[in-house]
Image: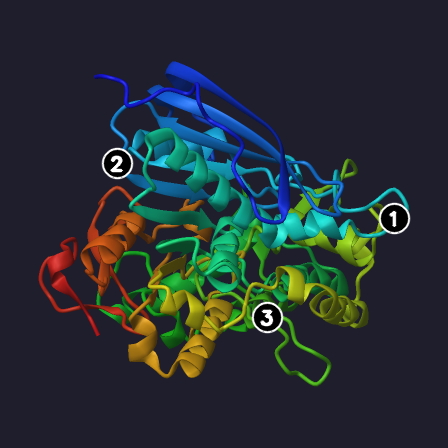
Amino acid sequence: MRRQTDCSHLTAPHVPGAKVLSINATERWNYSVPATPPFLLSPVQDLNICDVTVLLTHAGSQDQVTVKVWLPLQSWNGRFQANGGSGYVAGEFDLTLGPTVNDGYSSASTDAGVGFDFLSPGAWALDADGSVNFDALVDFSYRSVHDVAVVGKEITKQFYGTRPKYSYWNGCSTGGRQGMAAAQRYPKLFDGILAGAPAINWAKYVVGEQWPQVVMQQEQTFPSTCELKFFSDAAINECDELDGVKDGIITDPGKCSYDPLQSVGQVVQCDGQNITITNSTATIVKKTLQGPLDPSGERLWYGLNFGAPLDSLVNTTTTNDGTRTGFPFFVNDQWIKYFLARDPNYNTEAIDYDTFLDLFWQSYTEYNDIIGTDDADLSSFHHHGGKLLMWQGLSDQLIAPGGTIDYRDRVECLMGGADRTNDFFRLFFAPGVDHCGAGSTIGATPNDPFKALVDWVEQGQAPDLIPATVNDETKAERIICAYPQVATYQGGDADSAASFTCV
């Protein structure tokens, strides 16, 4: 196929609020991106691209932000897509650029100036004097979203001689949060935003994720992964068939009334040993499902749904002497150490209920305005014609679905009701699916929510449902319905999507 253009005449883009330090463009032919699980499961091969690297800095800041833009040398589809990050990184460069360009898009990704350690912000969170590096935090939280869109679209225009017809954001978790930062702070940037499992309530939920570890320490009980799976399986066994289909999936967790305490005294086979479920272990699971409470019993944040895996937040490890102890999830552990205690050596195992409460409100008070991304006012995004498609697994063990429902409900209240909100914002919950579709849960995973977004933006086809496939050997067909509707079995072949309707 003939080339569409070449790399030789690109110049530094204008980025409001920033100074471009350098731009470098290289043609790459037959370029490949190797598989890198869990971020990229299959290799992307035989790409012909213009690979552009833009370095920039912001006025009054000591930062240096990298934006990567990849442009197909052949068969550009006329669209631009920016991709988000995960954990503590704002973008994953080749791992998202490759698949996006392979689909014909010009694509952009950014490191936000904070590097690529998704497990820890240790390299950038604190200045030399131990104070928080707010410039870096602002870049990570939202400013880099503006940069990557402006640079990506300007370079696309230079390269092809025309603006992209449509511009999209695509991200999950941190990437979903970044998409919501775009909708709230930069409503003109994108025609369509796909926000998967968005970490929109960061300042609250991240500390909330520490709750199960605090409960374990207070109970001085540290369940094994096998015991935790017993409770998830027990909830599924009790509530699976409430939807009329036995498939290992709880379609509507709100209808499940399983109580972990009812399993006290049962014997579980774990690693060849018989283990009796104790009251302390059941209490830990019950409090994890409830979510963190203040001393008066009022909810601070949401818990998990019945049937969700528990092993990320109720995680444990075994020391050299064979003692099992708590092992916090990296996002909450690192947030507390670097941004709240401002001490990389802070012992999160020492957090009791009172300390937890102090940390929770400290996080919200000091950081919600920067990284909260939970502003319900989407009127500007709506006014500019943007479409927002949000989706999440109902068995997400990292981002509590209750927080996502709370956000959608607040948007409805502010925007004038469900019908007006549905004009531009639709939310889909995937039963049985873990965080961003990861893990080994048997759930109804959406087949292609991004295609549904594109059809909505470009064809005006507002999605009432998204096709899905059950993640087991049956590969049964399902549908996922726009909230608050739920896919309801009507009888017939339970492996066929035609047997379900949205109610």
Color style of the picture: rainbow
- Of tags 1 and 2, the one toward the viewer is 2
Q: Are marks 2 and 3 in contact (CB under 8 Å)?
A: no
Using the image, determine if residue 358 lies above or below residue 187: below
- Residue 299 in percent (x, y) is at 61, 78
- Residue 156 in percent (x, y) is at 39, 35
Q: Quadrant of the N terminus?
A: top left
**Quick one: which residue is furthest to the right in this view?**
129
Task: Return the residue at label 3.
Answer: 291
Q: Amino acid at mark 1?
A: Gly
Q: Which mark is residue 77?
A: 2
Crowding at label 2, few (<14), some or many (≥20) Cα neighbours within 10 Å? some
Task: Give the Cα distance between marks 1 and 2.
Answer: 48 Å
Using the image, determine if residue 295 lies above or below residue 74: below
Task: Give the Cα distance between marks 2 and 3.
Answer: 45 Å
Using the image, determine if residue 275 lies above or below residue 288: above
**Quick one: which residue is furthest to the top in this view?**
29
